[in-house]
Amino acid sequence: MGDITYLPLQNGSWAYLAAFQDVYTKRVVGWQVLGSMPEELVVSALRRALLSRQPAKGLLVHSDRGGQYGGNGYRGLLTKWQAMRSMSRKGECYDNAQAESLWSRVKTEVLLGRSAFASLTEAQADLTIYFDYYNQQRRHSALGYECPHTFEQQALLTKTQFCLN
């Protein structure tokens, strides 16, 4: 699932964060932060996600209806990886609820009482640390209070054991 959010900077401008999250494991698998939000923002985040996961043909990649998700570069990358594009229904905000939940956590836990990041560079650095923590240590009630990494490892082990029996 992919989405974009705005992050405040102290100079009054914005940083834009695009991320893709595995719906099953809650792992953030690809992300990018830029000072603007061209199509390349989501293409770069998706490229990182695809390269890190090496998904099988037919992966479903969901997003809201933002213009960046309809561009030629984005659609071309999905085609190259034989992935299918899914978009929220018009006017149906709940179709992307998991992404909105992630943004709530990011803004609460990364800003930690600050009103804004000092700079784009600080936002990039802080998010690098946060997403490593989020994937490797942060527990989720939806995952039985495991972190995404542990949950994923247990799911893979279970799948392997099931296949061997």
Image (tube, helix red, strand yellow):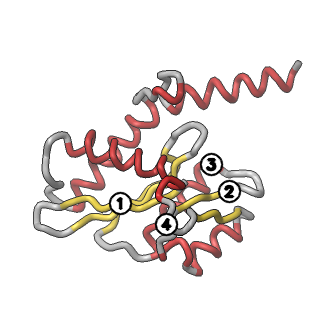
| Mark before the other along the chain sequence, 3 or 4 | 3
Mark 3 or mark 2, whichever is nearer to me: 2
Label disc, if present, on residue 60 of the rendered structure = 2
Please state, as top left, top right, bottom left or bottom right, where the N terminus lies in the image: bottom right
Q: Is residue 78 above or below residue 133?
A: below
Counting from the top left corner in percent of width and height, residue 128 is at 35, 47
Mark 4 or mark 1, whichever is nearer to me: 4
**What residue is rendered at 37% in x and 72% in y?**
37
Could you classify mark 4 by the number of other residues whose Cα lies within 10 Å: few (under 14), some (14-19), or many (20 or more)? few
| Mark before the other along the chain sequence, 2 or 1 | 1
Label disc, if present, on residue 53 of the rendered structure = 3
| Mark before the other along the chain sequence, 3 or 2 | 3
Q: Is residue 97 above or below residue 89?
A: above
| Mark before the other along the chain sequence, 2 or 4 | 2
Identify residue type, mark 3. Answer: Arg
> Cβ–Cβ below 8 Å for labels 3 and 4?
no
Task: Look at mark 1 in the image and give the residue it sits on.
Answer: 5
